Amino acid sequence: MMVRLLVALAACAAPLAAQDAPTVLRAARVLDGRGAVLTDVDIVVQGGRITRLGPRGQVPPGARLVDLGDRTLLPGLIDAHAHPAWYFNRQGRLHTTRDGDTPVQSMLAETANAYATLMAGFTTIQSVGDAADVDLRDWIATQGLPGPRILTSLDPIVEPQATPDSLRSLVRARQAHGADLIKIFASASIRDGGGLTMTDAQLKALCGEARALGLRTVVHAQSDESVRAATLAGCTQVEHGIYVQQSSLDTMAAHGTYFDPQCGLVFHNYLDNRAHYAGIGNYNDAGFAAMERAIPLAVADMRMALAARGLRVLYGTDAVAGAEGRNAEDLVCRVHDAGEAPMHAIVAATSLNAEALGMGNRIGAIALGLEADIIATDGDPSSDITAVRRVSFVMKGGRIVKYEGGR
Ligand SMILES: [Zn+2]
């Protein structure tokens, strides 16, 4: 009786997890996410995973053939720095805790952001972060809500006055509440100068405690001093680094610290949406002027980072309100403005990001046994990076969630 009940429950859950019959994906070319281009191949997906990747052949009986013609298949994109909880409220202003929106309204806005991000081809994001992420993450993972896989830090740890011991307990509390990683502010915002806000002892306490618990640490650091301090404290990943110097890039490379600078989307988005932000917190004239000055700095920074020997440069957009669903724009910026080879940028946003998120054995590549997170673009992004703006097919975990022109 119990066995029969379990079988029935499993059957009910199946449509949410993956189609049972195999799906064969076919397109003009496949970028495997590790730098290779494959042609004349079929990708067979079953049970949510890639079960065959090889020469085109007979479609197995009962399988569904999805022939994407002259499109390009590549792994689902990964954004290592996203903010799905940020949105513009119905008054057209940046949502804050005091704007009168209810938690339900905020969550609906967040699910809309998650949906837009998935439709843009991002099948995994790292949110850094918000307390409500845990429910968004879990409903997407288990309740059929369409959105990217989410790893979250929950609320960032900002407290510059806290003792090392109390910082360690904050790390433990985040883990107890379900955080996948720890987000730390080691510097002020770029709108407030970006200077160091934590001591070496504080950073060592935070990153050391997280490491002991098996959690990665992602550190906001704008000034060169803060980048260096986070690196020497043994933190896993450094964000932004708008004022970073060559010697700190080399130090990060030597320590195996991942670097996640942004190219342009975040600054252009703030400036394009100035009316939605202006007058809230540090979104004042001085703050906007700092962001305007950051645009050429960010591109120069990206060039310098990409040229630093042995430095692993991730793909993280810092997509805030107004930018969700446009997460691919920094790929275009990295290629067109910072001179990166298109394939190198694609590898950053797929297999390198997967490795940095500790998920390299599950996602980030089109390879046998990996989870079937696969997208298609109109055109070939390895020759024209703007093709990443034209994502017309999205499969996540073996389930097709977008198929323009499909039957
Ligand atoms: Zn951010």
Image (cartoon, grey):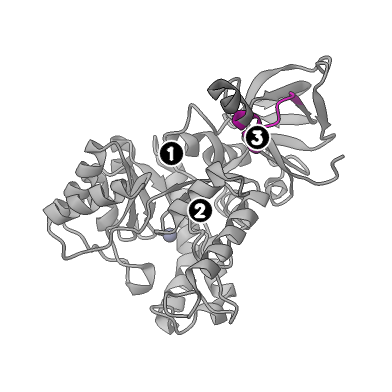
Tag 2, which secondary structure? helix
Within the image, what quadrant is residue 256 found in?
Answer: top left
Q: Residue at x 28, y 44 (%)?
A: 235
Q: Is residue 401 above or below residue 162?
A: above
Q: CA distance from mark 2 to mark 1?
A: 18 Å
The answer to which of 266 and 56 lies nearer the viewer is 56
Magenta range is 9-23
Asked whether the beta carbons under mark 2 and mark 1 sit within 8 Å of each other, the answer is no
Residue 19 at what x, y percent from top left? 70, 31
The first of marks 1 and 3 along the sequence is 3
Inspect the magenta stretch and tell me whether residue 22 lies in it.
Answer: yes
Q: CA distance from mark 3 to mark 2?
A: 22 Å
Residue 119 at what x, y percent from top left? 67, 51
On residue 357, the disc is: 1
Location of ligand 1 given as a quarter of the image: bottom left
Residue corresponding to mark 2:
136
Within the image, what quadrant is residue 24 found in?
Answer: top right
- Disc 2 residue type (three-letter): Leu
Q: Nearer the viewer, mark 3 or mark 2?
A: 3
Residue corresponding to mark 3:
12
The first of marks 2 and 1 along the sequence is 2
Q: Nearer the viewer, mark 1 or mark 3?
A: 3
On residue 77, the disc is: none
